[in-house]
Image (cartoon, rainbow, N blue to C red):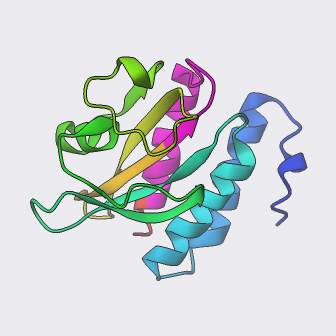
Amino acid sequence: MTFNPQAYAGTSAENEKLLLAQLRHLIEDEPYRIANLANASALLRGYLKDINWVGFYLLEGDNGGLVLGPFQGLPACVRIPLGKGVCGTSAAKRETLRVPDVHAFPGHIACDAASRSEIVVPLYDAAGELIGVLDIDSPLPDRFSEEEQLLLERFNALLAQYL
């Protein structure tokens, strides 16, 4: 299976099907969680246009907050308390947050000054327990669509089957 970003030349539906097939191919026989998250972030980096950061923050203990996991992009904030910023709020509420203007989000944590919009999707393990969030930033305002949100939620649901 090829992992060339130019492979995403079909329709939106064809590209999404290919992305999910590639994810499954990468993770279905690999038991190591960190490797799977690293490959998942690299896959999304090649798939999504106009993003400057993609990666995972992982839940540390019951009330420990989020700690930086595998990612693609510039160095990032290492720890985020639950309920703080977009990532911490998404994890605390256990819901996807699509933020068209990060500067208007109360308590936004700016790890990269170039980021203008953000989407954060909760990540669960195979047992349905929250283990972290998928975080994606863009230098463009209002970059993420509802269609992409649904795709990223499906992406995380597939990933969860192997975590």
Q: Nearer the viewer, residue 80 or 24?
A: 80
Residue shown at 19% from the left, 57% from the top? 65
Q: Is residue 19 above or below residue 115?
A: below
> Which quarter of the rendered picture does the C terminus lie within?
bottom left
Residue 158 left/right relative to 124: right
Residue 57 left/right relative to 135: left
Residue shown at 76% from the left, 40% from the top? 15
Q: Is residue 33 above or below residue 15?
A: below
Residue shown at 62% from the left, 30% from the top? 139
> Residue 96: where, in percent of width, then height?
35, 33
> Residue 149: where, in percent of width, then height?
50, 30
Q: Residue furthest front?
A: 113
> Residue 116: where, in percent of width, then height?
53, 26
Magenta stretch in the rendered image = 136-159
- Please tell me in which quadrant of the rendered image residue 39 appears: bottom right
- Please tell me in which quadrant of the rendered image residue 30 appears: bottom right
- Please tell me in which quadrant of the rendered image residue 71 appears: bottom right
Residue shown at 42% from the left, 66% from the top? 69
